[in-house]
Amino acid sequence: MLLAATLVAFSIFAFAGGNDADKKLLSDLQAAMKASSSVKWSSTDNYSKGSFAFNSKTVSAYYDAENTSLIGFSIHLTGADFPQDAVNAIHKKYGDWTITDAICFIDDHANGSYFAQVEKGKNKLALKVTASGNVSIFSRMPY
C-alpha cells in the first residue's frame, strides 16, 4: 500500500489543512475506530498501525511506537474518491505518468493532505499534493 513505510463521505475532504471539515473528519475517525470491533493491528519499530473499515473504505490509524501518541489516519482512495483538483494538479506536473494508488492523510492536528503513487515505465514516485495544489516528490519508490 502507498506509503506503508511512511477518511463521513469523501465530499467533505478539503485541501485546506486544519479546517472544520478536516477537524470533523478527524473526530469521526477517532470515534469510528473506538467503536470498531474489527481493528487489525500491526507494528514496526517506529509505529503501530490499526486498520479498520470506515464508510466502506480502508482506514489505518498510526501511533508512535515510543509514546503511543496518534500520528494520524490514512484513507485509501479509489477511482472517483480521489478529488479531481488533486488529479489535475498531478497531471499538470506529471502528465505522462499514471496514478496507481492514492490516500488522504489526516494528521493528529487535523491537517489533511493527499498522496499519490505514480508510475512511468519502471519509475515510481510517491507525490504529496498540498492545500494550495502544489505537487512535490514525497519519496522515490523502488522498482
Image (cartoon, rainbow, N blue to C red):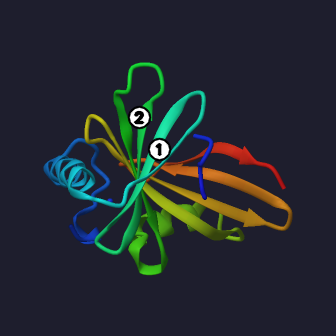
Rendered image: mark on residue 63:
2
Using residue 54 as the reference point, say whether residue 104 is left or right of it: right
Q: Residue furthest bottom?
A: 80
Going by the numbered disc 1, the residue's amino acid type is Lys
For disc 1, the neighbor class at 10 Å (few under 14, some 14 to 19, many from 20) is many
Task: Tell which of 103 and 33 is nearer to you.
Answer: 33
Rendered image: mark on residue 49:
1
In the rendered image, residue 80, in percent from the top left (x then y), is placed at 42, 80
In the rendered image, residue 54, in percent from the top left (x then y), is placed at 30, 66
Rendered image: mark on residue 84:
none
N-term mark: 1 or 2: 1
Task: Tell which of 93 and 116 is nearer to you.
Answer: 116
Q: Dividing the picture into quarters, in which one does residue 97 lie? A: bottom right
Using residue 79 as the reference point, say whether residue 15 is left or right of it: left
Q: How far, Cα to Cα, is label 1 from label 2?
A: 6 Å
Helix, strand or loop for disc 2: strand
Which part of the image, by quadrant, shows the C terminus?
A: bottom right
Q: Residue at x 18, y 46 (%)?
A: 23
In the rendered image, residue 8, in percent from the top left (x then y), is placed at 20, 67
Q: Residue at x 23, y 48 (%)?
A: 30
Q: Dividing the picture into quarters, in which one does residue 58 lie? A: bottom left
Q: Residue furthest front?
A: 37
Above or below residue 133? Residue 10 is below
In the rendered image, residue 41, in percent from the top left (x then y), is placed at 47, 47
For disc 2, the neighbor class at 10 Å (few under 14, some 14 to 19, many from 20) is many
Q: Residue at x 63, y 45 (%)?
A: 137
Task: Tell which of 41 and 101 is nearer to you.
Answer: 41
Helix, strand or loop for disc 1: strand
Q: Are marks 1 and 2 in contact (CB under 8 Å)?
A: yes
Q: Residue at x 29, y 59 (%)?
A: 37
Task: Tell which of 35 and 139 is nearer to you.
Answer: 35
Going by the numbered disc 2, the residue's amino acid type is Tyr
